[in-house]
Image (cartoon, rainbow, N blue to C red):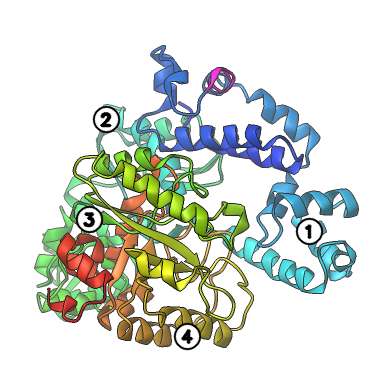
Amino acid sequence: MVANARIAADLDEIADLLELQDANPFRVRAYRNGARTVRDLGRPVAEMVAAGEDLRELPGIGTDLAAQIGRKVAGDELTPLIELRQAVPRGLLEVTRVPGVGPKKARTLWQELKVTSLDELQSAAEHGRIERLNGFGVKTQERIVRGIEAVRRFAERRRRADAEATLAPLLHWLRELPSVARLEVAGSLRRGRDTVGDADLLVVSEDPASVMQRLREYREVAQVVASGNDKTSVLLEDGLQVDLRVVEAPAFGAAWLYFTGSQAHNLRLRRRAQQQGASLNEYGLWSSDEAWLAGADEESVYQALSLRWVPPELREDRGEIEAAEADRLPGLIEAADVVTDLHSHSDWSDGSAGLREMQQAAVAAGLSVLAVTDHSPALAVTGGLDRDRLLLQWEALDRLEGSVPGLTVLRGMEVDIHADGSLDAEDDLLERMDVVVVSVHSRFELSEQRQTERVVTALRHPQVNLLGHPTGRLLGRRDGIRLDFDKVIGVARACDVALEINAHPARLDLDDRWARRAAQQGVPISVNCDAHDPSDFTLLRHGIVQARRAWLEPAQVVNTWPLTRLRRFLAKEPGWRDA
């Protein structure tokens, strides 16, 4: 069964290749929307096709797109993709992933310098040919060189959400086998790392050979790397390596613990076992006289070592062993704790849906408070709101007030931080907003000192409530800006500004380490979906995993607070911390 992630990837590739041809933007957008719909769908598209369901009932899927998806499910390639791959060198897709290039510049590089791959791009840069092109220059050429290094570095890992989307249909495929008694994900994917190198799966089965055969027969397997009685490694079509191991049920807990990691966490556990005269490995916990002590489940192993069970997200040897020993592990935040989202967009800027539709989606996602924070005008590509359009949006919100039961709507804006730290909105407008989110969307090349001064200057503005995606990173594509985070945290604490964990899988920004440091210093954290489409509210779970890796409890996250306390925080009223 072809995976939704595979179909969505093909649709996205069509959109990418069309952009390289400078095709009609509406056609590009149609494929982008189709990819989003398929990727976010809660069930396999292949099942819908098999059941004879009409794919045209899905948002953004028209007659032609439905027919193309049907071809893919039947085992054929998408016709537009075949044609585009013949017309546009596929290596250009890698070129577009270089920060600062994009489809327009990639097209120029292709047409003017015959660049069709990263290697050719690097050669052109090293020989000074790029700087001579109109619209490029020396600084652009230098950024491209740095960007090539980043793309190659990122190529070794993939975003956690992408790996999950790839694995979901494979897990379903394996669990359909009657001989599979239990199947679980381990490794860095289970620990919630924002990027992963491969996927580790553990299975309990009385017929291991049938499980290994089932994996080898999976439609998306491009190569069988190795296969034996207890382990099979395969490479999937999208490049993800999957390692499947069969373990005995009495040892499953010990194996799950071992293969979940991290290596540093496991080492601490093994040393602790040795100090108690025992030994710990993937088969169980054993006494000095080789008597089996524990291993059927993880909890029994931790208990035998006189520890509380440690949630997988915390297993990085960052103090969790000591906390488990002293019974001081945090009560980690859950998605169900979140009732507010303070960062969302609509079709008034670069979102795909209207205000009412976004509000309805927020309620359907379990939210009771939503801040509408469309872009300010500095970022032209987003269609940001100037003064007149912002006032019109507020009138539209007035007309909608109360029309979506159970939801409180806050007025706000995601305001660009200029290079000098000033804000891209007038003070009188900022004073009238319920929520002011400030973000960096440009001049990523500034030095750490200048970026830090830029950000802290913005945070000191009396109307600012939240620093959005603080580093501006894009996982797998762009490193974050360089900041003195200790200084940023100190100013945020002093100015009553929250720092965001942006839940979009491409960002997950702040990372877990700095989010934890900020929370320890008393800075509120806000986990937001940065929704640009109604379906984006489902991205919350990715931000929650990041928050859990940061050891965050519900009280440290503003999105869990009652509305009365939230309003006091946003208004910076004295005593809001005690509310």
Q: Measured from the top left, where is residue 316 in percent x and y?
A: 32, 71
Residue 297 placement, left or right of 266: left
Residue 400 placement, left or right of 560: right
Mark 4 crowdedness (10 Å alpha carbons): few <14, some 14-19, many ≥20: some
Mark 2 crowdedness (10 Å alpha carbons): few <14, some 14-19, many ≥20: some
Residue 454 placement, left or right of 437: right
Region rendered in magenta: 62-67
Write down the residue under mark 2: 179
Q: CA distance from mark 2 to mark 1?
A: 47 Å
Find out whether residue 152 is within the magenta segment: no
- Sooner in the amino-acid sequence: mark 2 or mark 3: 2
Write down the residue under mark 4: 484
Answer whether residue 245 is visible to the viewer in this image. no
- For image coordinates 38% across by 57% down, the residue present is 343
Nearest to the observer: residue 506 or residue 316: 506
Nearest to the observer: residue 437 or residue 166: 437
**Residue 119 — which label?**
1
Tell me: residue 31, above or below residue 260: above
Q: Secondary structure at mark 3?
A: loop
